[in-house]
Amino acid sequence: MNIKNAQKEVDQWISKYGIRYFDVLTNMVQLTEEVGEVARIISRRYGEQSEKEEDKDKDLGEELSDVLFVLICIANQTGIDLQKAFSNKLKIKTKRDKNRHSRNSKLL
C-alpha cells in the first residue's frame, strides 16, 4: 500500500460520504477508542485474560484498519504527509537501532 494514495483515498471518501472531517480532538478520541478495541482483542486472544464469548468473532484486521483510517484522517486534516514522515522515521530508526537489537541478549 502506498501511504500517499491511502491519504488521497481517505480524503475522497470523507468528501463523498463523510460530509467533512470530524475536528482533530474528536478524531483523537476516536483513535484512542479504536486502539482500545485492538488492545482488548489482543489482551484476550493472545494474552492471559480469557476471551468473552461476544468478543470471539471480532476481527483484529478490521479493528487495525479502523486505527489506520482515523490515523490517516488526523494526518490529512493537520497537513502531514505520512509517506514522507514514515520514510524519515525509518531512516532515524535505522541509524539509531541498526545494531541495538542484534546486541540485545533478551532477543537472542
Image (cartoon, rainbow, N blue to C red):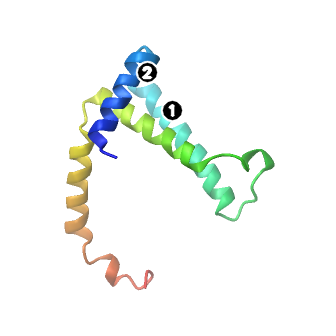
Quarter placement of the C terminus: bottom left
The three-letter code of the residue at mark 2 reads Phe
Location of residue 70 in the rendering, given as x and y in whole percent from the top left corner: 44, 34
**25 to the left or right of 83:** right
Q: CA distance from mark 1 to mark 2?
A: 10 Å
Callout 1: 10 Å neighbours few (<14), some, many (20+)?
A: some
Location of residue 34 in the rendering, given as x and y in whole percent from the top left corner: 54, 40
The answer to whether residue 23 of the structure is visible from this angle is no
Q: Residue at x 35, y 30 (%)?
A: 9
Toward the top, the furthest residue is: 19
Query: Under tag 1, what secondary structure?
Result: helix
Query: Under tag 2, what secondary structure?
Result: loop
Using the image, tell me which numbered label, if any, was put on residue 6: none
Of pointers 1 and 2, the one earlier in the residue sequence: 2
Q: Residue at x 29, y 76 (%)?
A: 100
Using the image, tell me which numbered label, if any, was put on residue 22: 2
Asked if residue 61 is positioned above or below residue 98 in the image, the reply reads: above
The three-letter code of the residue at mark 1 reads Gln
Callout 2: 10 Å neighbours few (<14), some, many (20+)?
A: some
Q: Residue at x 26, y 63 (%)?
A: 93
Q: Residue at x 34, y 37 (%)?
A: 6
Residues at discs 1 and 2 in contact (Cβ within 8 Å): yes
- Give the labeled residue for mark 1: 30
